[in-house]
Every structure is written in structure tokens, then in C-alpha cells.
Image (cartoon, rainbow, N blue to C red):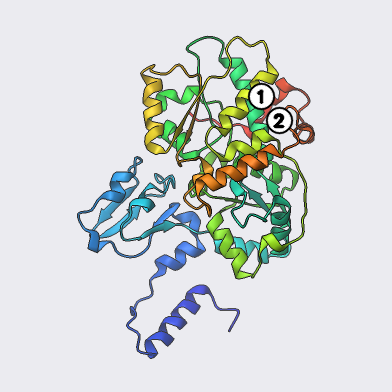
Amino acid sequence: MDETKTLQELYQEILQKEREKGRNLPDEYDAYPIDCLLHPENYAPVIAAGSCESCQGDSACQDSCIFDAIEKINGTIYIDPKKCTGCGACVDVCKMGRLMENQEIYPVLDALCDRKAEVYALIAPAFLGQFGKEATVGRLRTAFKRIGFSGMVEVATFADILTLKEALEFDRHVKEEGDFQLTSCCCPVWIAMIRGVYQELVGHVPGAVSPMIAAGRVVKKLHPDAITVFIGPCMAKKKEAREEDIADAVDYVLTFQETLKLFEAVNLNPAELPEDEREHSSKAGRIYARTSGVSEAVAETVAQLSPEKKIPVKAKQADGVKACRELIEKIKNKETDGNFFEGMACNGGCVGGPRALLPKEEGKALVNAYAKEAKYQTPLENPYVRELLERLGFTDIMDFLEHSDLLTRNFA
């Protein structure tokens, strides 16, 4: 094979050879699938593969999208990259199987092939058991290094840091009955729903980035030329990584399914590799992977910060887009006595993400077991959190709360 050929040229050559064998293939080159592969940043987190003419009149995909991101014209689906959040609702209801995630494998492989680039894998807290029950955090670190990554970072460590920030915000702002806080630390679809549909509640969301964004920004702060690749079960993270005010943090997003393909392509089984163990996260950061994890982490940290606080965390959670909307309506109508609200677009939380490799209950059990093994319960106990914050220049709690630009964004 001529290694100087572009993918487009190779694609055309293959089509021609198949035609010569008698296969009925289109005469014109269809640039769309190749362009999606080469330039995923130009497309929505969900893309349409093939015609939808045979399901004319069926609007299940459009009806499932609360963000009005889908339009169907003459049997062809158009997905607006500005509106699509990647929640995956349309993928689940598509009877023809024409909707799929926008994959970013090619640009990641391109980065890994650049021997001069430092490429870091940022792995989501939901990773437990996704690549085999024996694929521990240490073995996954070895696996990523084997395929060319410079290192692997547990995003749970940054969930620890964001837990501390949200706990401090709660302690500062929730002083009496009726005050409340909407978490900004978990689901990008939850945040998109508040910003896009329920803007009147934005003021109750603390100005904090997600653990993914925090991890990407900190890695780039410590390694300015680094390329960062987030790895998790969520398609919505692809959209979050491209949002204008935080697009400096994460270069590419791979789902667990994409990452499994990467391991299979190089015939690598993480479960069979040696350990490269480094424990940096507490129980608080590890349980972000499942529903109520953020709430529990913040509640325990608030209790440690202010044991005499008169208004403790009274958390309410919602699972799934429909339940999130119902919870927000209750908040608006003052039909709940909660003061800390957590919404997850996926049932079960991140372990129930659309590109997880395990059933959500199995994923949840493994996450809980990993959390139970943690040496530290909260970020206040975790010495690695303190060490990392000191490396970033924070000398005291108030300095961290007031001037943590790396960890802050404006939701208005």
C-alpha cells in the first residue's frame, strides 16, 4: 500500500476495485462518511448514517430531542451541531439504526503517531470493569502507555477537587430554608437543559467546570503542549469539549466503545497487562460515576467543612432526561424541600451511559466496590488534592474559592 495516499484516495481506489468485481456501488464519491471520520469537530456528537426514506412519517427521533436539534428533509436527517447535546435519546429510538455517535478515533490515532506529542488519556470514573473485570486502573494505565499515550489521569481526582469547590459554594450560599444549589459537576445534558430551557435557574448553578474540563485544563497547565483525550461512556462529552468557553481543555473525546476498538485493533487486552498502580482519588471522586454520587460526595464534604452548619445538604436526584425535567419543574413550582439538586441524563448515572460496555447495575456495583477500597473518604482527607492545588498556586481555601480560574466558567 502506498503510505502517501490520503484516506479519500484510498476510499476511491477500493470503490473502483469493488465495481470491477461486479458490485453495484455508487459512481460518485460520498465525502460525508470520510469527512466525519477526518473532521469530527465539524459535526454533531450524533451523526446520521444512510437514508431514512423508509421511515417517512415516523418522527420518533425528532420527538425524542428536547433541544430541537433534528430536522428531516426528503428522507434525510440533519442534526444541528450547535443544538445537539449528544444525549443519545434519538439513537435509542431510531428504528432503522441510522443514527450513531460521531467517532474521533482517527484524529486520536494521528496524535499518537506523532512521536513528539505528549498525549494524555483522561479516564472517567465509570471505567471500572468496562474493559474486563481484571482491567484495574493500574493495568489500564499500562495499556494506554503501550499504545502511545504519555500517561493516564484518573478524572476522579478532579471530581475530588470539584467536590471541594461545590461544598464551599454550598456552605457560602445556602444559609436558610428556601436557598438551593443545582450541581454543575456531573452531566453536560443537565447543564445544557438548564442553560437552554430553564435559564431562570442558572443563577443557582455554581460557576464550576466539570471534572473532565478540570482534568484537561490542569494537564495542559502542567504540560503546555499536551494533547488531552477524555475517555468515558458519554457521547455528550464530545459536545461539552467543544463549547467555546471551555474548548481549551480537552482535544478529543473517545467513548468506551471507541476505546475498546482501539485496544482490539492493536490486539491488546488490558486485563492481561502488569499493574502501574498510583492511587490519587478518594471515595468522593470515585462515586461520581453513578446516580447520587455527586450529592453524597458534596454532603460528606460539607459536613466535614462545617460540622455546626444549621442547614445540611438535603439532596434530590433525577435519572433520565424526562425525570430531570420533572425535577426542575418541581423546583420552579416550589414543590420540593431539597436544597441540592443533581440531574443525570442517563439512568443510573454515567455507568448507564449510551456507550458503556457493561449493564448499569454491574457498573454501579464495581464503582461502589472501588469507592469502598479508597484510602480517603473526601477531598479534605486526600493529600493528593492538597498537593495538586498547591502546585497550581492555591495557598488557602478562600484563594481556591475566589481565584480558581482553571476550574470556573460563566453559565449566564
Q: Amino acid at mark 1?
A: Thr
Instruction: From the top left corner, tell me how far across and down residue 398 is, in percent.
Output: 71, 20
Find residue 18 and report its horizontal and vertical position in percent.
41, 85
Residue placed under numbered mark 1 in the picture: 301
Q: Is residue 200 left or right of residue 219?
A: left
Q: Nearer the viewer, residue 330 or 395?
A: 330
Between 312 and 222, the residue placed more toward the observer is 312
Query: Foreground residue, 332 or 10?
Result: 332
Assign a secondary structure to mark 2: loop
Residue found farthest to the left = 57
Label 1: element kind: helix
Left or right: where does residue 367 sit relative to residue 222?
A: left
Cβ–Cβ below 8 Å for labels 1 and 2?
yes
For mark 2, does the 10 Å Cα neighbourhood hold few (<14), some (14 to 19), or many (20 or more) residues? many
Amino acid at circle 2: Pro
Q: Pointer 2: what residue?
A: 379
Q: Within the image, what quadrant is residue 144 found in?
A: bottom right
